[in-house]
Structures are given as structure tokens and as C-alpha cells.
Amino acid sequence: MNDVILVTGGARSGKSRHALALAETATHRAFVATAQPVDDEMRQRIEKHRAERPKSFVTVEEPLDLAGALRRFKAGTEIAIVDCLTVWLGNLMHVHGPAVDSFQEVSAFLDVIEAPPCRLIVVTNEVGMGLVPENGMARRFRDLAGQLNQEVARRADSVLFMVCGIPLQIKPERGQSWSS
């Protein structure tokens, strides 16, 4: 059975770098990028991430249909990184609108990670530890991101919280207990 690892933390906490390190030993690796180059700043961020990623990753750029992207992996894919859920959620809100209570793409993704096609590392931002956003749409995003992160964490075998580039395990891996 393939496991799911959720890597969360604040912006620039080392989440993506740690996810790449976790996938280092696999030979057949995939990377699902959710960002879209909507402006010059985002294009630069995407280029920086591409440059940091080893060329041995098969990269799939998928801003909306994560479940479909995961289902289309070639047989033999050992591990895949999804980076990142909060960018993906923003994409969904942009397409469907912020007032939607649930997105079918989220339900489909949660279904896929119940039995992932390979070992899966999912990167997401923890957005609930800062100030309460001043506008309704930003608060809605924070609330939906919190719900999504909780659902993924519940299904994940392991959850890591990144602080200053250091991973803190907050949910033990399968077979471990809190006391061991």
C-alpha cells in the first residue's frame, strides 16, 4: 500500500525543499505543479522551482484536476510530489468563485489519496496561524484551506510541519505510536 505524507508549514519554511529530499532515493519520480504563470512574479517563482527540481522528475503542470493527474501516472512511478494544495485551492476559487462550499475537484483528489497510485508527498501552506484576514474572500480562502488541510492530514500516514527548514513530525508514520 502506498503512503501519503503531508508537508505543511508557513511560506518559505522549506516545505518544497524537504519534499524533494524525501523523494531523493526513488528512481521513478513525478512532480505535479499547480502554479500558473499569471504574472511576471509568479513566472519567476515557477522558473526558480523548476531550476531547483532535479531533471529526473517527470513534471506535470496541472492547475485544476489533481485527481486526474495522479491517475494518469505511468506504471512504475514510485513517488510523486504535489506542490501545492493552497495554490491549487486558489486556482479552484478563481474558476468556480469563492462562494462555493465544496469543489468536486477536491472530493475527487481526496478519493484518490485514499488509495494513491504511488507514494505521495503533498505540500501545503498552513494559513491559520497568522492574523485574521481583513476581507471576506481572504477569510473564505483561509477557512477552505484549513478544511482541505485537515481532510488531507486525516488521510495522510504522516504529517510534517516545517519550521525554519526543520521538519517536525506531528503525525506518526504507519506502525509508529506516539509513545515509541
Image (tube, rainbow, N blue to C red):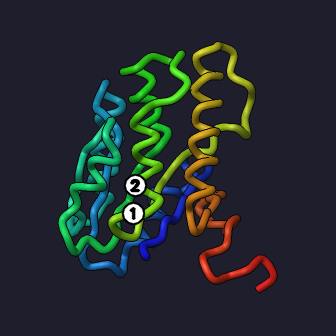
Residue 161 is marked as: none
57 or 44, which lies in front?
57
For the point 31% across and 52% down, the residue is: 32
Relative horizontal placement of residue 138, taking residue 110 as reference (left or right): right
Crowd rating for badge 2 (residues with CA inside 10 Å; few <14, some 14–19, many 20+): some
Q: Amino acid at mark 2?
A: Val
Q: Depth check: 176 or 111 in front?
A: 111
Q: Residue under label 2, please give it.
A: 112
In the displayed structure, would residue 149 be above or below residue 71? above
Q: Crowding near pointer 1: few (<14 within 10 Å), some, many (20+)?
A: many
In x, y percent, where is residue 40?
30, 27
The residue most toward the right is 179
Question: How many numbered dots are placed on residues in this image?
Answer: 2
- Quadrant assignment, res 157: bottom right
Say above or below: 18 vs 12. Answer: below
Q: Position of residue 101 (x, y in %)?
A: 55, 24
Q: Secondary structure at mark 1?
A: loop
Q: Return the x and y of residue 169 as percentages of the image width and height.
A: 67, 69
Task: Identify the amino acid type marked 1.
Answer: Pro
Residue 92 lies left or right of residue 152; in this view the side is left
Query: Residue at (30%, 33%) from the top-left corner?
Result: 36
* Callout 2 touching callout 1 (CB < 8 Å): yes
Residue sticking out furthest to the bottom = 180
- Residue visible at 60% across and 77% down in the picture: 174
The residue tagged 1 is 116
Label 2, secondary structure: give it.
helix
User: Which quadrant is the N terminus positioned in?
Assistant: bottom left
- Residue 97 % position (x, y): 45, 16
Query: Marks 2 and 1, Cα distance to the nearest angstrom?
Result: 5 Å
Residue at figure coordinates x 23%, y 60% from the top left = 73
- The C terminus, quarter of image: bottom right
